[in-house]
Image (cartoon, rainbow, N blue to C red):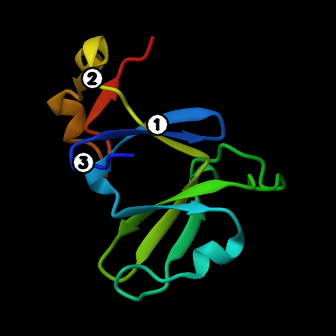
Amino acid sequence: MNLSAHMLLSVEVAGAMYVVQREHIGAMRGIFRPADLEYPDEHGRPMLTRRLADLFALTDSAAPPPTRQHALIVPTRRRSVALLVDRVDELDLSGALINNIQPLPDVLARRLGRPWFSGVLVWE
């Protein structure tokens, strides 16, 4: 997968799809077994690991996690956070899809607690 800086990624979490800017992700790793999460980040610091589905309250906490996941590694000042997702794909922004990305209105964007959402992808 070509990981250019301004690419958009589609991220699947518990059957729901989200769009993420590639530049917000420090690295990605395939996770096949729990030991894959024990490796430190690129600065040698241990990572904090969380399932994104649990943070969004999308899954039953008693349900076992999928056997294969992907870690989206987001660097922070003190340590990196590995967000576990079910699937990651590069979005093809050719054709009409690029025209379906709409920026958030200024009045809404100013009220966000965190600037995580910069726009909406209208998916039909």
Which callout, 2 or 3, points at the residue further toward the start of the chain?
3
* Foreground pick, 49 / 7: 7
* Residue 69, label in figure: none
| Image quadrant where one finds the C terminus | top left
Residue at the disc numbered 2: 101
* Foreground pick, 10 / 120: 10
What amino acid is labelled 1 in the image?
Tyr
* Foreground pick, 1 / 124: 1
Q: For mark 3, does the 10 Å Cα neighbourhood hold few (<14), some (14 to 19), or many (20 or more) residues? A: few
SS class, disc 1: strand
Check the image and name the residue furthest to the bottom.
44
Q: Residue at x 49, y 85 (%)?
A: 46
Q: Is residue 17 above or below residue 51?
A: above
Q: Is residue 101 above or below residue 31?
A: above
Residue at the disc numbered 1: 18
What amino acid is labelled 3 in the image?
Ser
Using the numbered discs, state the Cα–Cα distance from disc 2 to disc 3 in whole angstroms: 19 Å
